Amino acid sequence: MKTLLLDTKGDEYINICSDIVKKSGIVALPTETVYGLCANALDESAVKKIFKAKGRPQDNPLIVHISGLKDVEKYAKNIPESAYLLFEKFWPGPLTVILKKRDIISDLITANHDTVALRLPNNRVMQNIIKKSGVPLAAPSANLSGRPSPTEFSHVVEDMNGKIDAIVDGGKCDIGVESTVISLIDDPIILRPGFITIEEIEKFLPTVKLYDKVFSEINEKEKVLSPGMKYRHYAPKSPLICVIGEDNKAANYINSNLEINTFCIVFDNESHLYKTKNIITYGIKQMPNTLLKNLYSALRKADSYNAEKIYIHCPEMDKEFNALYNRIILASSHNVIYLGNK
């Protein structure tokens, strides 16, 4: 398959991509979180192409992206007041809300659950295609299943060129990590931490909890309501080892375990602590959002050097690092070294 590589100058990309969507094709589009692999969420034949292109297990549900609040009641029912409160505070934006689904939403999208995950993205390109095509878009991240999510056009080309109909270059994603996923089926529970933190949601839903398996392994036979909870996710090709601990302790541990072509992903201000030139920095420890934005690019960069092993220094556990820690432990297949605080 020849994949069209499009830019966002003018309106040509809107017409091309919306026509592809209406004809059961798939396109990769930027969002504020990561690039999405998009198809008509109401067309099962198109949705099947997403699973095929990604190599994605079909028991891993997809998020449905909509164009406005008016669409919520088309695809969900029994919507609680808490949902409208979250919509008002966080939409459009990086929050996905799980609600009871209407029959118009295929079981293929929801992995045979009676729920649907809805998001109103805050990205001009994505919104243009949803509105022009006139349909909601099912859109997981536009990468091969298990690989680091794509936050730049080049990442999508690397994984999807020749597998899908078109890729739109929208530059680097503003946030760089997938949306927060919250279920409102019973008591509010965050199933996947993301850019919007539990502290922010607690201001409006004081009883919200974090799912108790966010940081632990899930049995492969267990059914899950949200993407990003099961299977190996976000992972580089090389073995990844997460090291949690104070800066000097982490550096000492990693330095004592360096091998040929080992790469280290560390905070911006600590490169001098390491006895290797194979250093990739991914942000400022005191600014968690910089780490989130650069994480996937750093993992892909290490792969580009054919690293035999990758160490990544992760901050000590704290609520503000929930999303980062969740992504790293999944990327490392729970290969985590805890060194204590001091």
Image: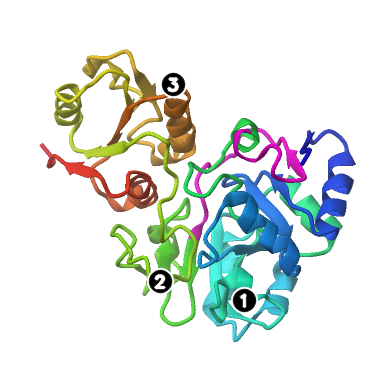
Give amino acid for label 3: Tyr
Q: Which one is in front in this view, the residue at disc 1 or the one at disc 2?
A: 1
Between discs 1 and 2, the one toward the N terminus: 1
The residues colored magenta run: 158-180
Residue displayed at 33% across by 36% down: 239
Coloring scheme of the render? rainbow
Between discs 3 and 1, the one toward the N terminus: 1
Q: Mark 3 points at which residue?
A: 305
* Residue 198 place in picture, x, y as percent: 39, 60
* Residue 260 place in picture, x, y as percent: 27, 18
Distance from disc 1 to disc 2, alpha carbons, whole Å, reads: 22 Å
Query: 24 above or below 254?
Result: below
Query: 219 above or below 281?
Result: below
Give amino acid for label 1: Asp
Distance from disc 3 to disc 2, alpha carbons, whole Å, reads: 39 Å
In the picture provided, is 223 more to the left or to the right than 110?
left
Residue 189: mark in rendering: 2
Disc 1 and disc 2 in contact, CB within 8 angstroms: no
Local SS, label 1: helix
Between discs 3 and 2, the one toward the N terminus: 2
Q: Mark 1 points at which residue?
A: 107
In the picture provided, is 66 more to the left or to the right than 316?
right
Give amino acid for label 2: Ile
Towards the viewer: 157 or 1: 1
Local SS, label 3: loop
The reply to whether residue 176 is visible in this rendering is: yes
Label count reads 3
